[in-house]
Image (spheres, rainbow, N blue to C red):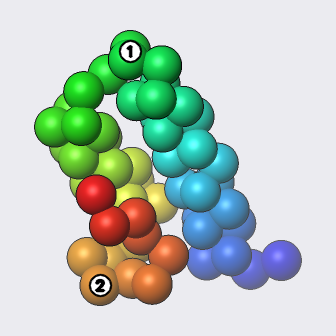
Amino acid sequence: MSSKALAVIYYTATMAVFNRWLAAGIIREDELIKIEAAIAQKYGLSERSIYRQNT
């Protein structure tokens, strides 16, 4: 599996956790937006990546 594919998998899994936290009220939506940008940067996803969430 390519490193880009692994990055997308890790990004998706990480964001699933944070989305659960949002649903549980642990974090706010404005925090999720900041977290999403940081996680995308960590895994090398561009701002226009089709794999990024539209938060």
Give the Cα distance between marks 1 and 2: 28 Å
Q: What amino acid type should be assigned to the residue bearing mark 1?
A: Ile
Left or right relative to 30: residue 14: right
Residue 38 visible somewhere in the drawing: no
Residue 10 visible somewhere in the drawing: yes
Rendered-image quadrant of the N terminus = bottom right
State the residue at coordinates (28%, 58%).
55
Q: Is residue 11 or residue 20 the one in the foreground? A: 20
Q: Is residue 26 or residue 37 the one in the foreground? A: 26
Residue 20's x, y, as percent? 54, 31
State the residue at coordinates (50%, 75%).
51
Q: Is residue 4 or residue 36 the one in the foreground? A: 36
Disc 1: which residue:
26
Q: What amino acid type should be assigned to the residue bearing mark 2?
A: Arg
Question: Height in image: 44 above or below 50?
Answer: above
Left or right relative to 45: residue 30: left
Tell me if mark 1 has few (under 14), some (14-19) or many (20+) residues whose alpha carbon lies within 10 angstroms of its own: few
Q: Secondary structure at mark 2?
A: loop
Where residue 48 is drawn, which disc sits there? 2
- Closest to the camera, between mark 1 and mark 2, is 1
Residue lying at the far right in this picture: please name it: 1
Residue 52's x, y, as percent? 42, 69
Residue 46's x, y, as percent? 32, 78
Question: Height in image: 33 above or below 12?
Answer: above
Q: Earlier in the sequence, mark 1 or mark 2?
A: 1
Q: Secondary structure at mark 1?
A: loop
Residue 39's x, y, as percent? 39, 49
State the residue at coordinates (24%, 27%).
28
Question: Height in image: 12 above or below 8?
Answer: above
State the residue at coordinates (25%, 76%).
47
* Number of residue marks: 2
